[in-house]
C-alpha cells in the first residue's frame, strides 16, 4: 500500500470519529422538554403561541358569523318598499340607506350616507374575492358608484332597487347588472372607531 493511500485512509478514519452520531428522536424530545423546564420564559412563549393560535381561529369564526348575520338580517327586510332618502323599514329604504341600516344594526358600524361615499370609505377588492356581506356597486345613473347592494353569495346581491320596487335579491349575472357593475368593496372597521376604514386605492 502506498504512503499516500495510508494517509488518505487514516484521514478518513479520523473524520469519521469526529462526526457525532445522529441524535435519537427520544433524546431530542427529552432535550426540548428539559430546556423548557429550565427556562419558564420558553414555556411561557409556547403557551402564548398556543393562545394566539386560538385567537386567530376565533377571529375567523367571528368574521364568518358577522357575514352570516349581515345577510340574515338583510333578508329580513325583503319586501320593504323603496323610498328616496329612506333609512328605515318604517319609511322605506333607498339603496345606500338600506346598506347603512344593515351595517349599523348588525355590526354597529356606521357607513357614510351616499353610495359613492360608501365606495370611498371601504376597501377595494377584486370581484373574484367577493364574500357574503361585501358591497357591490353599479353605475345606474351615468355616474360611478350610483347604486349599491350587499353581496349574499353565489353571484347574487340584495338591494333596494328603485322607486316603485321593493328590497329584493337579484343575480349580478343578469345583463342589466353585469353591464353596470362598477366594483366590489369590503367593509373593514377602522381601529378604535365605529366607522369604516378608508379605501385602499389600486
Image (tube, rainbow, N blue to C red):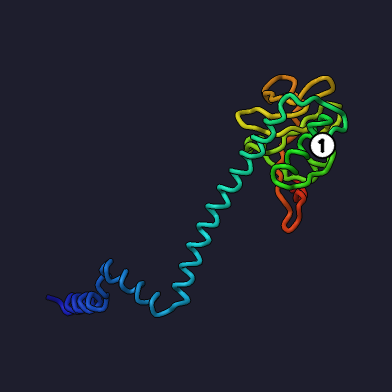
Looking at the picture, how far across and down is residue 54, in whole percent? 51, 57
| Camera sees residue 94 | no
* 187 sits to left or right of 22: right
Residue at the (43%, 79%) spot, across then down? 39
Percent coordinates x, y for residue 195 in the rendering: 77, 50
Q: In which quadrant of the rendered view does residue 82 lie?
A: top right
Q: Nearer the viewer, residue 62 or 191?
A: 62
Q: Residue furthest front?
A: 90
- Identify the residue shown where x is 82% and y is 24%: 162
Position of 88 with respect to 9 (left or right) is right
Image spot of residue 38 (x, y percent): 39, 80
Residue 28 located left or right of residue 17: right
* Label 1 crowd (10 A; few <14 / some 14-19 / many >=20): many
Does residue 17 sit above or below 199 in this rendering?
below
Residue 2 placed where, x, y %? 15, 76
Image position of 30 with respect to 108: above or below: below
Q: Nearer the viewer, residue 18 or 142?
A: 142
Q: Of residues 165 and 149, which is closer to you in this image?
A: 165
| Above/below status of 180 relative to 106 | above
Q: Which residue is mark 1?
A: 115
- Quadrant of res 169: top right
**Displayed quadrant of residue 173:** top right
Picture quarter with the C terminus: top right
Q: Residue furthest left?
A: 1
The quadrant of the image that shows the N terminus is: bottom left
Q: Secondary structure at mark 1?
A: helix
Q: Is residue 123 visible?
A: yes
Identity of the residue drawn at 44% across and 72% down: 43
Nearest the eye: 95 or 45: 95
* Position of 197 relative to 148 (above/below): below
What residue is rendered at 70% in x and 48% in y? 188
Amino acid at each position: 500500500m502506498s504512503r499516500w493511500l495510508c494517509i488518505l485512509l487514516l484521514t478518513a478514519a479520523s473524520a469519521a470519529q469526529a462526526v457525532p452520531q445522529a441524535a435519537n428522536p427520544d433524546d431530542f424530545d427529552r432535550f426540548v422538554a428539559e430546556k423548557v423546564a429550565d427556562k419558564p420564559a420558553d414555556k411561557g412563549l409556547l403557551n402564548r403561541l398556543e393562545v394566539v393560535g386560538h385567537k386567530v381561529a376565533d377571529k375567523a369564526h367571528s368574521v364568518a358569523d358577522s357575514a352570516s348575520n349581515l345577510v340574515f338580517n338583510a333578508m329580513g327586510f325583503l319586501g320593504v318598499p323603496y323610498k328616496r332618502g329612506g333609512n328605515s323599514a318604517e319609511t322605506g329604504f333607498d339603496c345606500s340607506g338600506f346598506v347603512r341600516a344593515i351595517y349599523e344594526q348588525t355590526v354597529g358600524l356606521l357607513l357614510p350616507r351616499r353610495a359613492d361615499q360608501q365606495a370611498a370609505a371601504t376597501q377595494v377588492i377584486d370581484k373574484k374575492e367577493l364574500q357574503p356581506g361585501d358591497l357591490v356597486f353599479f353605475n345606474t345613473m351615468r355616474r360611478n358608484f350610483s347604486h349599491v347592494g350587499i353581496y349574499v353569495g353565489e353571484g347574487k346581491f340584495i338591494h333596494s332597487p328603485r322607486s316603485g320596487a321593493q328590497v329584493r335579491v337579484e343575480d349580478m349575472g343578469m345583463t342589466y347588472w353585469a353591464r353596470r357593475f362598477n366594483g366590489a368593496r369590503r367593509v373593514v372597521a377602522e381601529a378604535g372607531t365605529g366607522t369604516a376604514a378608508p379605501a385602499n386605492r389600486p
